[in-house]
């Protein structure tokens, strides 16, 4: 197990973080629309041969631009290599990896409430989005709406499969 410290210049505070275990990316959301994608490369095999701790460097350190408010929720779609982020204004952006860089693929802004939780299902085909006002939206990976409803409840956590 390795422990890494992630700091951002300018003392911007993190609001969310999510790790893509399959691809090794880390998404960090913070104040003032900050969204960074990092990828840490380790040379574990080489280190094992020498009996040393695994040296590492960032193979990616990209700032994604599109949010103006604090990025509060980030989640990965492992199967389709997509990142989904949402800010304090309720703006949702789906990012895709293309030729080694992350680009904006889709934008959704309900303009009514803030996203409290988002999660892709196991096969990456659907995303469940839960808003602070009780609205629940299930969408597909291509951007179409599957389910749209509002419940009078307070969301504490989400599980989606």
Image (tube, grey):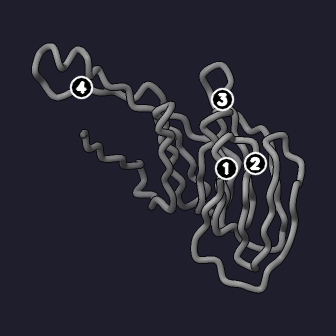
Residue beneath the point at 73% across and 49% down: 93
Lower position in the chain sequence, tag 4 or tag 1: 4
Give the Cα separation between the discs numbered 1 and 3.
17 Å
- Name the one closer to the observer, 67 or 160: 160
In the picture of the structure, the residue carrying the numbered disc 2 is 126
Mark 2 lies on a secondary structure that is: strand
Q: Is residue 155 left or right of residue 104?
A: left
Lower position in the chain sequence, tag 2 or tag 4: 4
Q: Are marks 1 and 3 in contact (CB under 8 Å)?
A: no
- Compared with 46, 94 (above or below) is below
Label 2, residues with CA under 10 Å away: few <14, some 14-19, many ≥20: many
Residue beneath the point at 41% across and 49% down: 8
Lower position in the chain sequence, tag 4 or tag 3: 4
Label 3, residues with CA under 10 Å away: few <14, some 14-19, many ≥20: some
Mark 4 lies on a secondary structure that is: loop
Label 4, residues with CA under 10 Å away: few <14, some 14-19, many ≥20: few
Q: Are marks 2 and 1 in contact (CB under 8 Å)?
A: yes
Lower position in the chain sequence, tag 2 or tag 1: 1
In the picture of the structure, the residue carrying the numbered disc 1 is 120
- Compared with 137, 63 (above or below) is above
Give the Cα separation between the discs numbered 3 and 2.
18 Å
Residue 117 in picture, x, y percent from top left: 64, 64
- Name the one closer to the observer, 74 or 158: 158
- Residue 55 numbered mark, or none: 4
In the picture of the structure, the residue carrying the numbered disc 3 is 97
Residue 96 in picture, x, y percent from top left: 69, 34
Residue beneath the point at 52% across and 58% down: 30
Residue 11 in picture, x, y percent from top left: 40, 57
- Compared with 16, 84 (above or below) is above
Q: Mark 3 or 2, which is nearer the eye?
A: 2
């Amino acid at each position: 197990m390795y422990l890494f410290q992630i700091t951002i210049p300018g003392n911007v505070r993190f609001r969310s973080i999510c790790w893509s275990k399959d691809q090794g990316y880390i998404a960090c959301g913070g104040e003032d629309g900050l969204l960074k994608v990092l990828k840490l490369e380790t040379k574990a095999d080489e280190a094992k041969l020498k009996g040393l701790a695994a040296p590492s460097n960032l193979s990616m350190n990209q700032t994604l631009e599109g949010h103006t408010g604090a990025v509060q929720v980030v989640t990965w779609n492992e199967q389709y290599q997509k990142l989904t982020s949402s800010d304090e204004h309720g703006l949702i952006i789906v990012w895709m990896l293309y030729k080694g860089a992350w680009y904006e693929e889709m934008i959704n802004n309900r303009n009514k409430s803030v996203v409290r939780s988002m999660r892709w299902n196991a096969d990456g085909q659907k995303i469940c989005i839960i808003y602070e006002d009780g609205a629940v939206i299930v969408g597909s990976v291509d951007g179409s709406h599957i389910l749209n409803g509002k419940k009078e409840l307070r969301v504490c956590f989400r599980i989606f499969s």
